[in-house]
């Protein structure tokens, strides 16, 4: 059996020293923990505060710069728009002024046209009357066609839907048609009153020099006597008149013909 020995005085003294040393260490640690931290240098605090203020100031400057740049851009845009508006208004004023000048010019032209119209209308009536007289004295060819044209011209003078210029144009066209009759030859079928009877005949016109006829059976041939103003029967020209009809209808090549042309009158 083992025995537990009692502690000696020396060992108890050693344990007490260890306990006292540990207690002192704990007390010192607590004291150090409770000791206040050393104070920050005021210069550093001022420098930090100054840096923060500078940063805030820079942010404000940047913001103001952005706002100023935006205002400048808006002002420039407004200035450009104002300049465009001034250019537009200036051009509009020029257009209005030009339209006023054009309006004044048109009014003057209308007044002048009124004066011309008052002179032209009587002239057109005279031209129609002259044309009618000319047709009455001319050889009697295409009488219905030419008479209808004259009637149409006379009716035009009372039509409000036709301008003066259009009426004048149609009168000049009728004159040109009459002039063209003297430059060509023509063959057509018409009706003549011969011996009191109306007969269908072939008619040959050579310019305004000759107007001849031939019955469809070629039994009778004659021509218009311009001096005596009546039809003359002359069968001696039957073959040449027949050839002339074929030439005018492009059924035969042109050739020399013996036709009853009037003798040349004395030189005046």
Image (cartoon, helix red, strand yellow):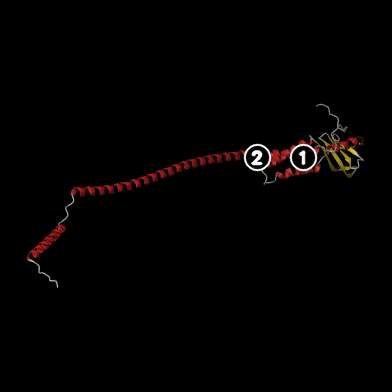
The residue lying toward the viewer, choosing from 83 and 264, is 83
Checking the image for residue 117, the label placed there is 2
Q: Would residue 229 be seen by someone viewing this image from the given angle?
A: no
Q: Which residue is drawn at 67% across and 38% down?
A: 120
- For disc 2, the neighbor class at 10 Å (few under 14, some 14 to 19, many from 20) is some
Question: Residue 17: x, y in percent?
Answer: 10, 62
The residue lying toward the viewer, choosing from 82 and 124, is 82
Count of numbered badges drawn on the protein: 2
The residue lying toward the viewer, choosing from 178 and 31, is 31
Q: Residue at x 65, y 40 (%)?
A: 117
Checking the image for residue 132, the label placed there is 1
Question: Residue 179: x, y in percent?
Answer: 76, 36
Q: Quadrant of the N terminus?
A: bottom left
Question: Residue 89: x, y in percent?
Answer: 47, 42
Question: Residue 140: x, y in percent?
Answer: 82, 39
Q: In which quarter of the image is residue 148?
A: top right
Q: In which quarter of the image is the C terminus?
A: top right
Q: In this view, does 42 lie to the left or right of 151?
A: left
Task: Give the mark nearer the N terminus: 1 vs 2.
Answer: 2
Q: In which quarter of the image is residue 5?
A: bottom left
The residue lying toward the viewer, choosing from 216 and 82, is 82
Q: Quadrant of residue 113?
A: top right
Above or below: residue 50 compared with residue 139: below
């Amino acid at each position: 059996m083992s025995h537990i020995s009692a502690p000696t005085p020396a060992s108890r003294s050693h344990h007490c020293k260890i306990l006292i040393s540990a207690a002192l260490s704990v007390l010192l640690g607590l004291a150090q923990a409770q000791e206040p931290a050393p104070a920050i240098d005021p210069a550093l605090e001022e420098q930090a505060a100054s840096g923060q203020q500078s940063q805030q100031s820079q942010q404000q400057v940047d913001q103001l710069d952005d706002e100023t740049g935006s205002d400048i851009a808006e002002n420039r845009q407004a200035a450009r728009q104002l300049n465009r508006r001034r250019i537009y208004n200036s051009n509009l004023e020029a257009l209005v002024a030009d339209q006023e000048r054009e309006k004044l010019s048109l009014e003057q032209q209308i007044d002048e046209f009124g004066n011309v119209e008052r002179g032209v209308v009587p002239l057109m009536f005279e031209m129609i009357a002259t044309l009618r007289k000319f047709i009455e004295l001319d050889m009697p060819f295409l009488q219905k066609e030419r008479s209808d044209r004259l009637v149409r011209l006379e009716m035009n003078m009372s039509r409000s839907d036709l301008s003066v210029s259009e009426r004048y144009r149609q009168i000049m066209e009728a004159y040109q048609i009459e002039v063209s009759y003297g430059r060509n030859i023509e063959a057509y079928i018409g009706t003549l009153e011969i011996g009191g009877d109306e007969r269908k005949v072939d008619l040959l016109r050579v310019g305004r020099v000759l107007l001849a006829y031939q019955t469809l059976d070629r039994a009778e041939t004659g021509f218009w006597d311009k001096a005596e103003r009546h039809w003359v029967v002359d069968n001696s020209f039957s073959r040449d008149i027949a050839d002339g009809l074929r030439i005018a209808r492009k059924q035969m090549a042109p050739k020399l013909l013996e036709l009853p042309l009037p003798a040349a009158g004395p030189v005046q």
